[in-house]
Amino acid sequence: MKRLNNFQPFAWGFVSGAVGWWVVLAYAFGWTSAGTAHRLAAQQSEQAVVGALAPVCAERFLALPDAAEKRATLAKATSWERADQFPDEWVTLPGESWPDAALINACSKIVLETPPGAAQPTKESTASTSSSG
């Protein structure tokens, strides 16, 4: 019985020390669990893919023959209606089967921030202008 009475303070000290050490690791040294690290990595990789595909989507949108009309419609559309302004294959991430909201928003932002009538230069037009001069 004497051993059990001595064990309880030891157990509480061990548990509080473990929790305290976990707090120190997490906040002072930036330690995270494996699940949190995987979640953060997935978010960062999706942001990188969206950042790479949004200019391509905007370039395709601005290259459409009726881009001015579609741009005006896009400007009036709510965030929920913007997905209907783009073909699904332009705003769907690789490996997914549905349009990505972040890609739609990024593409819309680029299209709406581009001055009307100013198409973004393509690689071919940049190469032809630099070689012709």
Image (cartoon, rainbow, N blue to C red):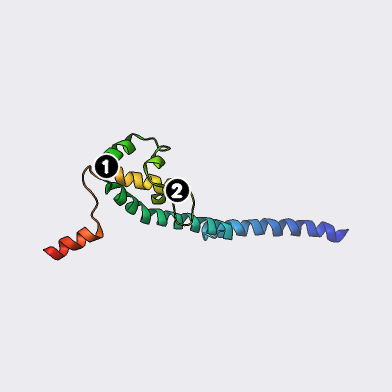
Relative image position of residue 19 (x, y in whole percent): 64, 56
Can residue 24 be seen from the camera position used here?
no
> Picture quarter containing residue 130?
bottom left
Mark 1 nearby-residue class (10 Å; few <14, some 14–19, many ≥20): few
Q: Looking at this view, is 69 or 23 the one in front?
A: 69
Q: Is residue 30 left or right of residue 110?
A: right
Measuring 84% from the left and 61% from the top, which residue is drawn there?
3
Residue 100 is labelled as: 2
At label 2, which amino acid type do we have?
Asp
Residue lying furthest right: 1
Can residue 52 be seen from the camera position used here?
yes
Measuring 70% from the left and 57% from the top, which residue is drawn there?
15
Measuring 30% from the left and 40% from the top, which residue is drawn there?
70
CB contact under 8 Å: marks 1 and 2: no
| SS category of the residue bearing label 1 | loop
Task: Classify the position of the C terminus by image quarter.
Answer: bottom left
| SS category of the residue bearing label 2 | loop
Relative image position of residue 128 (x, y in whole percent): 17, 62
> Which residue is under mark 1?
66
Relative image position of residue 119 (x, y in whole percent): 23, 49
At label 1, which amino acid type do we have?
Asp
